[in-house]
Image (cartoon, helix red, strand yellow):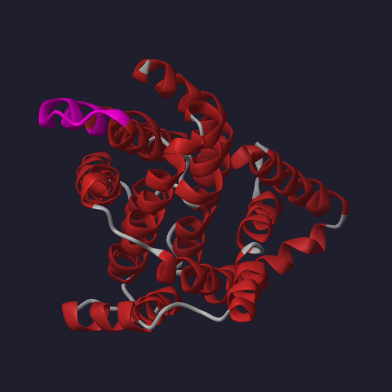
Amino acid sequence: MSALILLGVCMLLGALTVRIKPEASDWVPGLNGWVLNIAFPALVLELIPKLHLEPGLWFPVMAMWGTALGSAAVLWLVGRAAGWSRGVIGALVLVAGFGNTSFTGIPLIEALQGKDHLGAAVLADQAGSFLALSTVGVFVAAWYSGTATSVGAVLLKVARFPPFIAMLAGFAVGAAGGWPVLVDDLLHRIGTTLSPLALFAVGLQFKPADIRANLAPMAAGLGWKMLAAPLLVFATGRVLGVSGIPFEVGVLQAATAPMISAGILAQQSGLAPKLANTVVGVGIVLSLATVPLWNLLLG
């Protein structure tokens, strides 16, 4: 659970720092740039070559893709009905569609279910959340931000996204036998900066007033991510007869807090930055209670 405590401490440090030193808010673009263009690709380059797809663990992977695609459909409908702007809808689709399956999901699953569930949890994270964000997530960001309005232009944005490039390189390296130990260690050390710096940046921007100002869209996004999505995964698993570790991991990973990197992607794309940051921050705090509740439902 030390990883979860670290996330909370980093976010708190960011909130305290900006109150003591208001100009610290100017650090956010640089921090987000490092996270999305350096740390995230390094993490992908480290993990993808180690990815081993196992036929029996298809369910938690598909649960992550289903959560992302479901977010795109459901929150588009909700946003249109509520009259929200294109930026608000795009931000919600991103932050509510991709779970923080690595830095909150894996530690919570280990604490709640044990180490025998970690293999499936890691697979859901890498083949599910990571790959979905690097493809579907970038597509969503480009489309809703208006920076690319044709399918070809959007696909070009995806192809130029650093984590997507890292993903392709990672598959090639994995096919060639993996990285030398020194390179793997270097990538690991760079990748571990992702979560602390990202949460510090969230804290720098976090304001209680933003919760009140964005209450309705925030409730919709978190309602999908932490209630409706895991409920649908639970129901789908039951209908399909999935059980055991794949079922349990699929539900718990679907219930995790919004992905930090998805929030940063929304901010860098100009999609309701305050809303995206607020949903990520509030979601991480809530997940410490809601994920254990889902675990109780699993028995």
Question: In this view of the protein, which residue sits in the foreground, 11 or 52?
Answer: 52
Number of marks in the rendered image: 0
**Picture quarter with the C terminus:** top left
Residue 70 seen in the current view = no
Residue 238 lies in magenta, yes or no?
yes
Residue 167 lies in magenta, yes or no?
no
Prevailing secondary structure class for the magenta stretch in the rendered image: helix
Residue 220 seen in the current view = yes
User: Quadrant location of residue 294?
Assistant: top left
Instruction: Give how far across and how far down residue 281 sits, in percent.
Output: 58, 43
Instruction: Give how far across and how far down residue 134 sits, in percent.
Output: 36, 68
- Can you say whether 258 is above or below 248 in the image? below
- Can you say whether 149 is above or below 188 in the image? below
User: Residue at (32%, 82%) from the top-left corner?
Assistant: 159
The segment highlighted magenta reads 233-244
User: Residue at (86%, 57%) from the top-left corner?
Assistant: 21
Instruction: Give how far across and how far down residue 211 sits, in percent.
Output: 56, 37
Query: Which residue occupies the extreme right position in the image?
Result: 20
- Left or right relative to 36: residue 234: left
- Can you say whether 110 is above or below 13 in the image? above
User: Residue at (64%, 72%) from the top-left corner?
Assistant: 185
Question: In this view of the protein, which residue sits in the foreground, 148 or 86?
Answer: 148
**Picture quarter with the N terminus:** top right
User: Residue at (46%, 43%) from the top-left corner?
Assistant: 118
User: Quadrant location of residue 252?
Assistant: top left
User: Quadrant location of residue 85?
Assistant: bottom left
Question: In this view of the protein, which residue sits in the foreground, 155 or 194?
Answer: 194
Instruction: Give how far across and how far down residue 29 sits, in percent.
Output: 63, 70
- Left or right relative to 67: residue 113: right
